[in-house]
Amino acid sequence: MKVLVCNAGSTSLKFKLFDMPAETVLAEGKIERVGSDDAIFHYQKPGCEKIYLEKQSIRRYADGIKMYLSYLTSPENGVIADIKEVERVGFKTVLSKGYYGIHELTDDVLKGMEDYLTIAPAHNIPYLEAIRQFRDVLPDATMIGAFETAFHTTIPLKRKMYGIPYEWYEKYGIERLGYHGASHSYVADVLTERYGSTGKTVSCHLGGSCSLCAIDNGQSMDNSFGMSLQAGIIHANRNGDIDPFIIPFLADEGMSMDEITKGLTKNGGLLGISGISNDLRYIQEEAEKGNDRAQLAIDVFVEGIIRYIGSYAAEMGGLDHIAFTGGIGEHGTLVRQMVCERLAFMGVDIDSELNEKCPGQGVISKEGSRVTVDVIAANEELGVCRKTYNYKK
């Protein structure tokens, strides 16, 4: 079976075509700067040189999807004879009201995504457009949404419940939902393959968007996100955990809701604290030059990671593994070193040389470390593909 996985971002599209159940990647593509006349198109099939095209006019997601599909079937670069060979399309969808697992993307499920546009506007809007375009061009294919909340349905209610009037939970469904499920579930799969069990693990997905997940015997027990993706540790641009009364305070000080929202979602996080960039690499460079705000941004980021790991170890009653994944998790040697050194009292014994030389995947703890520290290269698309392929109608 040919399964195509689509990952839609606010200005990007990523694709991977798999041959299942062999899990062979036949071709992958990526489009940056969707919505502009200066888009970048990437396309590659195994064993061939990557195609890289700049200054492409890709004004809509539909344009990008059509461009990728045309390459899949082209005589020079194609890997399938007809687009109809694609039997299923899997999406790394985020949130739909009333649908939190793996679902066929029916009209009702899409309506649930529309109902939660205020909770996840940067994610649901591009996915709705992409899904509808795929439904048009592949009317016979089955569309599957592997919702980011799916992995977290096992979290006990006592850890999902906010201290709000109970009727708000009943009427509006307000609770901690958890996200990055595709990433954390993939981490659980890798650890299970590696060690036979996840044991008690804290998975740290660190990148532009960040979250930590408590995993016990392969099941999600807690996640640092809340009902939305604004909560948890600080992100590249997002604020993370915040006292809700800061918002009405700023409003009373004369700020508009648009200004407040932009500050929390676009100008907060690493960018807001450092005043330099939302990219930790640039922040680290400035910190090494003596920039105090840059160093503060790094310190706040690390403190948040430590706080969640400690609380999750307490919830699970122990800790066997810490796993780092995502762009920062895979390549942020400084952050990994700072976090692990602070957790030495819990039995974390990092090997500094292995950490520095880690190519983005591998074990970076010493052989006798009570807690094993793994770096796992993110492969969310494979996780979504497996769920899409195994979905039973």
Image (cartoon, grey):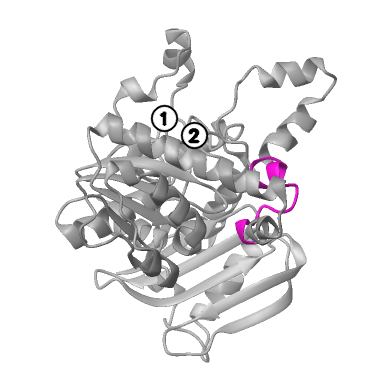
Q: Which residues are magenta?
A: 266-281
Q: Quadrant of residue 120?
A: top right
Residue found 47% across the figure and 21% down from its top? 174
Q: Which mark is residue 112?
A: 2
Q: Nearer the viewer, residue 277 or 5?
A: 277
The local secondary structure at tag 1 comes to loop
Circle 1 residue: 98
Q: State left or right for residue 166 relative to residue 111.
A: left
* Amino acid beneath label 2: Gly
In this picture, is 352 found above or below 387? below
Instruction: Inspect the magenta stretch and tell me whether residue 277 lies in it.
Output: yes
Q: Amino acid at mark 1?
A: Gly
Question: In which quarter of the view is residue 364 placed?
Answer: bottom left
Which of the two residues, 184 or 300, is positioned nearer the viewer here?
300
CB of mark 1 within 8 Å of CB of mark 2?
Answer: yes
Crowding at mark 2 (Cα within 10 Å: few <14, some 14-19, many 20+): some
Q: Taking 157 as reference, is 229 left or right? A: right
The N terminus appears in which quarter of the rendering?
Answer: bottom left
The residues bearing labels 1 and 2 have C-alpha atoms spaced at a distance of 7 Å
Q: Is 228 placed above or below 188 here?
A: above
Residue lying farthest to the right in this orientation:
254
The structure residue drawn at horizontal position 50% and vertical position 46%, both measured from the top left corner, is 210
